[in-house]
Image (tube, grey):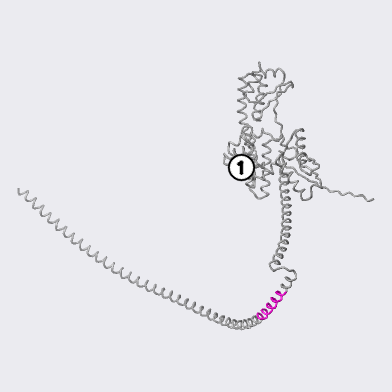
Amino acid sequence: MEYVIGILIGLLVGAAGVFAFMKMQAQNLLGLARLEAQSLKNKAEQEAQARTREIELAGRQEHVKVREQADKELEAARTDVRQQEQRLSKREDTLDRKLDTLGVKEKNLEQLESRVSAREKVVGSKEEQLTSVLREQKERLLSITNMSQDQAQELLLRRVEDECRGEAGAIIQRITEQTQEEAKEKSRQIILQAIQRYASEQTADHTVSSVEIPSDDMKGRVIGREGRNIRAFEKTTGVDVIIDDTPGVVVVSCFDPVRREVARISLEKLVQDGRIHPARIEEVVQATEKEMEEELLKIGKDAAQEANLPNLPKPIIPVLGRLSFRTSYGQNVLRHSMEVAYLCQVMADELGLDGTIARRAGFLHDIGKAMDHEMEGGHPLIGMEFLKKFGESEAVLNAALAHHGDAPATTPYTPLVMAADAISASRPGARRESLERYVRRLQELEDLAMSFEGVRQAYAIQAGREIRVIVDAKLIDDRSATKVARDIAKKIETDLTYPGEIKITLIRELRSVEYAR
């Protein structure tokens, strides 16, 4: 027990010692903290005093700068004031000189006004004298002519009006003749330049519609037993096959040139193959039709590329290919369309128009000829309706519709297409016609001219491009001769069909014969 008490007493004494030690340590730390706080306080007071001195110094420097700036601005203001004072003094001197000048001008103006007033008095008296003299002269003239004043004025005005009308008519006639001559010369130059710049090959073409047969035995195989092969061929292709006594030739006839070409190629394949029967005929024709569609598409693409029109709608391309198998008076229509396109562009460029639009209108103007054998109506209307489906411009549509004068021209490109169409159709070697048709056309032309009263003779020359009309000088005078020539031209345009244009030359000759005996 005592041992435990001793241990407790020892622990208490140790705890008291520890407490005393820790208290001493705490007092020492508190003293050190107080000393450090006092040191920091003294240091902060010193820094505050130094900062205060720096701020005072900076303030004094800023004050000095502001004062210097104010002094400079004040000096500049004083300088401006001095300059303004100098300018004002100069202006005052100038105003003084101007006032002196105005004073002198006022004196001169007063003198001038006095002289003008004196002249006005003199002029007034002279006007009164002139008025009285004119009155007396007028009264004398009226008394001599026995006319009133209104009648005299009316007569004078009528004479002046007649003179002015005659002079105006002469001026208008002179200007009209000069304008027509200049227009003809300019158009002639443009057309000649377009023709010279386009060097084309001959576009006349023959439609091949005959097939060579190696022997008469092959003719019999083409006909077949009781004609079944030829009937199957005609039914499948839609053409007429003509087999006559001509050796080695079978003629294929059809109004559709593409269908005729398909039939010709199919018949050549059958002849080369030797197997000719209805099933084989149908097979060969179907294959040839597919080949023809590809060929038409290729021809149309090549033509569009050559005409520099790559943006044509796709449905138009194969239709252009069909034009390569269409002829007009022996002239290939596709080549003719390309000629017209080029000529239109050349003339449009010379006239300051859009060459691309002109080329497009010329290239598509005859597209209706590829469908005119399948649809009712003329090729201008058919072509216009076809192009209208694909959103072509008004210039292209009107060129297709009115290039033969069937409708009025609404754009300046239509006359260009008409001119280019006539140039392409009428150039040498472009078109061919039979001798019978040629003679009949010339005869019709001469008969039409002879149907007019006063015409004695008519001669068609230049292959029907010109007609010379000789009239009776006793029945037709010089004034009516022009009207007769114009009437003949209008009747030719209305009644006849012809490529290009026809020149009408009317000749009136008056012969006076006397004999001296």
Q: Is residue 230 above or below residue 135?
A: above
The quarter of the picture where residue 209 lies is top right
Q: Residue at x 77, y 37 (%)?
A: 443
Question: Could you tell me the amino acid type at mark 1?
Answer: Leu
- From which residue to which does the magenta span run? 119-136
- Mark 1 lies on residue: 397
Locate residue 499, reporting x and y percent: 72, 39
On the picture, is 345 further left or further right than 77? right
Locate residue 507, reporting x and y percent: 80, 46
The quarter of the picture where residue 218 lies is top right
The quarter of the picture where residue 338 lies is top right
Instruction: Please name whichever residue, 258 or 498, is drawn nearer the observer in this view of the structure.
Output: 498
Q: Is residue 30 above or below residue 89?
A: above
Locate residue 480, reporting x and y percent: 76, 49
Locate residue 2, reporting x and y percent: 4, 49
Look at the numbered disc 1 and give the secondary structure of its residue: helix
Instruction: Please name whichever residue, 60 or 275, is drawn nearer the observer in this view of the structure.
Output: 275
Instruction: Please name whichever residue, 10 or 209, is drawn nearer the observer in this view of the structure.
Output: 209
On the picture, is 86 further left or further right than 511? left
Residue furthest to the top: 225
User: Is the residue marked by circle 1 packed among few (<14), some (14-19), or many (20+) residues within 10 Å?
Assistant: many
Q: Residue at x 70, y 74 (%)?
A: 135
Helix, strand or loop for the magenta stretch, by majority = helix
